[in-house]
Amino acid sequence: MKKMQALKRRIQTIKHIVKWVVIIYLLTYIVCLPFRESKKGADETSYKLLQAYVESGLLETAPMRHKTYSNGEVFLLIMVPSAVSNFEQRDAIRRTWGNVSTTKPTVLLKFVLGKSKDTVQQSLAETENSIHNDILFEEILETYENLSQKSIALLRWASTNCKGVKYLLKIDDDMFLNLPRLLNELNAHPKTNTISGCKVSGASPFRFAFSKWKISRSDYKQDYYPDYIAGTAYLISGDIISNLYRATRNVPYFIFEDVYITGLCRKHIGAVALENKGFNCGYRNRGPCGNNFRYQITGHHYTPREIQRMWLELQDRWSNCRLVDHYFIYKLVDLFKYMFL
């Protein structure tokens, strides 16, 4: 009799578990369906209108000349390494925090692109530049291993074409930036001989044979990296840009861009790695809501759609974060999107 009762309880428990699994799955599907559809639609319609203009001959892809800036013209140079295919990310930046550069003449925005094997995307990116004239094309193949090459290229361009710039911000194209706050901070607290952002200290190379990030002794002999600034976003004071670029000719090339530029090359020229608490470099460590960045400078890994909404929320001092943007809820939604999208 007791065995039968225990068996019934187990069956009831299993039924409850199955019921809740089905409920959670259905809720997850309902929550994630808009993300699935918008992602699919964005992929299918990515710059199709631009492509139609190119094919019709209404737009020509003649190479654009970039102006050379003299002393005092540019206070903040923002350079964004971007993959050729990331049309939506660049468009979102131009519509949001990058648009501030059009109203503040001392702020300059440039995207840094490599070469794509996809000739159609490459042609579209060149047409995009003929419209906006804010893209620098480098003869660098778009691979992870070449990210350090892109950063060397942007340092070269800044030191050659933007002499006298006060600050250079290197920032990835999936970052949210509170540009007004950054400008206020730079005006209130000037910096020299520094690279600032999210400081990493005491990091050591992965030596595991099967790790994606494996670094052999022949690639890097030391047990620890020098202090460096996380590569998602870092601010370089203008007085060291040229020296930093020259250091890349003397310091052996290293695959990890942030370790190479802000660690090894920075150390070579005697500049300081400075922690800035306003830079958030952890993976989506704040909910995708503009209010969460009212007193912050950067946030890492947001979609173009999120960046545009967050920027509007940031401009509205009376806006409130949606329930779904609160920490535990959006983390759960992110997990479900990762599992089901």
Image (spheres, rainbow, N blue to C red):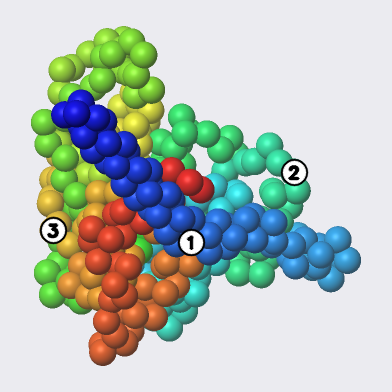
The residue positioned 18% from the left and 17% from the top of the image is 222
Residue 271 percent coordinates (x, y): 16, 44
Q: Nearer the viewer, residue 306 or 299?
A: 306
Between circles 3 and 1, the one closer to the viewer is: 1
Q: How busy is the neighbourhood of tag 3: few (under 14 within 10 Å), some, or many (20 plus)?
A: some
Q: Is residue 321 above or below residue 338?
A: below
Q: Is residue 62 visible?
A: no
Q: Gap in Å between the C-alphas at discs 3 and 1? A: 37 Å
Residue at the front extreme?
1
- State the residue position of label 3: 277
* Quarter where residue 181 is shown: bottom left
* Quarter where residue 131 is shown: bottom right
Q: Going by the image, does 16 lie left or right of 309?
A: left
Q: Nearer the viewer, residue 132 or 31?
A: 31
Question: Considering only order in the chain, which callout, 2 or 3, is on the residue closer to the N terminus?
Answer: 2
Residue 200 percent coordinates (x, y): 16, 40
Say which element carries label 3: loop
* Quarter where residue 310 is shown: bottom left
Q: Hey, what amino acid is under mark 1? A: Ile
Image quadrant where one finds the N terminus:
top left
Picture disc at residue 119: 2
Q: Going by the image, does 309 lie left or right of 266?
A: right
Residue 253 percent coordinates (x, y): 37, 26
Picture disc at residue 291: none
- State the residue position of label 1: 30
Say which element carries label 2: helix
